[in-house]
Every structure is written in structure tokens, then in C-alpha cells.
Amino acid sequence: MPVIVLGGIKHTGKSTVGRILSKEMDMAFTDLDDLILKRLPFKWTIRKWYREKGADAFKKKEAEALGEYLANCNPDEFRILSLGGGTLENKAAVKLLKNPESTIFVLDEKEEILYQRIIRKGIPPFLDSRNPKESFSVLYNARRETLLNQGDHIINISGLDQQSAAARVREQIRSIYGR
């Protein structure tokens, strides 16, 4: 049975949509960020690891956590996995996901909506603190193109609340798997 993989740029609602789908469709839910956190030293956050160890060290942890998760999945049940915002740019992670057991659904949201969501919690380490809006725009455009190319299914969720976004994904899952 497949792993329903939710990808998208940071703050598209992958984890929230995944939790909603999990409850409504009776599927196990896992957030890749939680699996990565378990691999980090005590009291470290993903932001701290990324900031202090760098992108390559983070991508390595991400791929390790993903590989372990996929290897330990029960092949007899559907499950939902929420990715990090940059996971589909991690070549090692994408290689693991591109298999018959995984179906990647990319949640596609407008740039301005995502920027406003991201900036609410402060400027993350992957944005230039001198001009966060411009650096997010560059990241958004580059990342969005990659995500659209990596996804098996693109779900436009522009302006939808999380319940409506989950309903749109659920419809797509049902049309594919009849579930």
C-alpha cells in the first residue's frame, strides 16, 4: 500500500492537512520533521541544527530519517507522510521517495500567503535577514518549480483553509485509489 506523501513549500499546511486526512481516512500520520528531531542531540531544534551545521548536514539527517521511516512502514496499510519544505530538493530524499510505494502530492499555495505565514514566527535561517521578502521570492520561485516537477499530483490550495485543502487532497486520493 502506498505512502501518501505531502510536499510543498514551508507553511503550505502539509502537517495540518496530513493530520486532518489521517483522522478522516483512518491512516497513520507521520511528520518527517518529528523523525528528524529524534535524530538530533537533546534540546536541539531543526532551525538550530540547520543554522549551526549547515544545509548538507541537515539534508543528510533528513534522508536518514526518511530512509528509516520507509524501511519500517507496514506494507499492508496506507499511511500519510508530511515532508519538510525543502525535502523535494534533497536528491537523496527524492531518490528514496521515487518508488512504487510512494505517491507525492504537492500542495501549491500563492507566494504572498506563504510569506506572511512564515514571517509571523520571525525570519528563518534560510532567508536573508536584510531583505527577507526578496530572498523568499527567489526561494519560492526556484523551489516551486522543483516541487511541481517532483510531484506526482499537484493540488492547488490557493486561499483555502486547511479543512478545504484536506478535502481537495482527499478527493484526489479517492480518485486514484478508490479509498
Image (cartoon, rainbow, N blue to C red):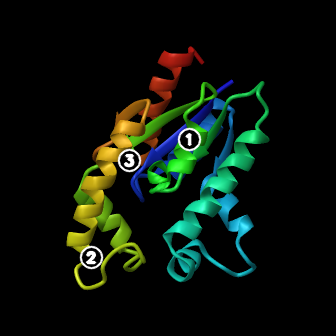
Task: Indicate which disc residue 161 carries.
Answer: 3
Q: Residue at x 51, y 45 (%)?
A: 17
Residue 49: x percent and y percent?
A: 59, 77
Mark 2: amino acid: Pro
Image point (50%, 69%), residue name: 55
Q: Quadrant of residue 100?
A: top right
Distance in Å between CA atoms under marks 1 and 3:
31 Å
Q: Are marks 2 and 1 in contact (CB under 8 Å)?
A: no
Instruction: Choose mark 2 or mark 3, whichever is in front.
Output: 2
Report crowding for label 3: few under 14, some 14 to 19, many 20 or more residues within 10 A (C-alpha): few
Q: CA distance from mark 2 to mark 3?
A: 25 Å
User: Could you say which is closer to the camera, residue 26 or residue 50?
Assistant: 50
Q: Residues within 10 Å of mark 2 (few under 14, many from 20)?
A: some
Residue 133 in sight in this render: yes
The circle drawn on residue 95 is 1
For the residue marked with disc 3, what is the amino acid? Asp
> Which comes sooner in the sequence, label 2 or label 3?
2
Q: Identify residue for label 2.
A: 132
Q: In the image, 106: left or right of 138? A: right
Residue 79 shown left or right of residue 89 in the figure: right
Picture layout, residue 132 above or below residue 66: below
**Kind of element beneath mark 2:** helix
The mark nearer the N terminus, 2 or 1, is 1
Q: How many marks?
A: 3
Question: Left or right: where does residue 143 sit relative to residue 11?
Answer: left
